[in-house]
Image (cartoon, grey):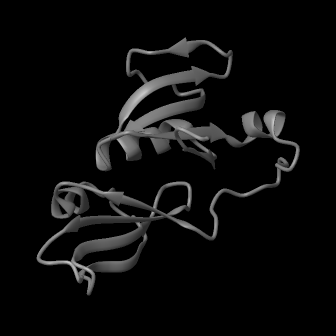
Amino acid sequence: MANSMSTNLMVIDVAEALHFYRDVIGGEIAFVVDSKQETAMDGSIPEDAAFASVRIGDSELMLQERMSLVEDAPMVTADSEPGGTFAMYFRVDDVDEVVAKLPEGTEVLKPLQMTWYGMKEIWVRDPAGYVITIGTPEGDPPV
């Protein structure tokens, strides 16, 4: 039986993605591997980062540079583009605080609003093009 699940996202720029998931979403950098396969566990972000692990609550988000992933996964090619047809959902303590930290130019897909299911949420694209939803429970959710 599985005991955990991690998501591994292909990105063009691991350092840029790390800044987003640490500084905006509030994740904690577990470790970063650079292009020479040297591992940093001190929270630093080398410019030539090829892989990283970010802790978000009890979850792990892995970020892997495209050419690094080409070496690991035969279905990925040098022409593969990041992105996807799914959305990751981040439940945060204060969505307004997170929205204030979004980098200038962040593509907002669905503006901040209150949903029928009791979440105040916003849909955006992360720097690599992945769709993420960020929300905070407010009010009474439906039964």
Residue 86 location, quadrant: bottom right
| 29 with respect to 96 (left or right) | right
Taking the view exactly as shown, the residue that stands out farthest to the bottom is: 116
| 88 with respect to 93 (left or right) | right
At horizontal 56% and vertical 61% (from top left) the residue drawn is: 129
Taking the view exactly as shown, the residue that stands out farthest to the right is: 74
Of residues 6 and 51, the one drawn nearer to the viewer in this rendering: 6
Taking 90 as reference, is 30 above or below it? above
Q: Position of residue 88 (x, y in %)?
A: 47, 61
At horizontal 13% and vertical 78% (from top left) the residue drawn is: 140
Quadrant where the N terminus lies? top right
Q: Position of residue 52 (x, y in %)?
A: 54, 31
Taking the view exactly as shown, the residue that stands out farthest to the left is: 139
Of residues 65 and 134, the one drawn nearer to the viewer in this rendering: 134
Residue 56 location, quadrant: top left
At horizontal 71% and vertical 43% (from top left) the residue drawn is: 66
Taking the view exactly as shown, the residue that stands out farthest to the front is: 1
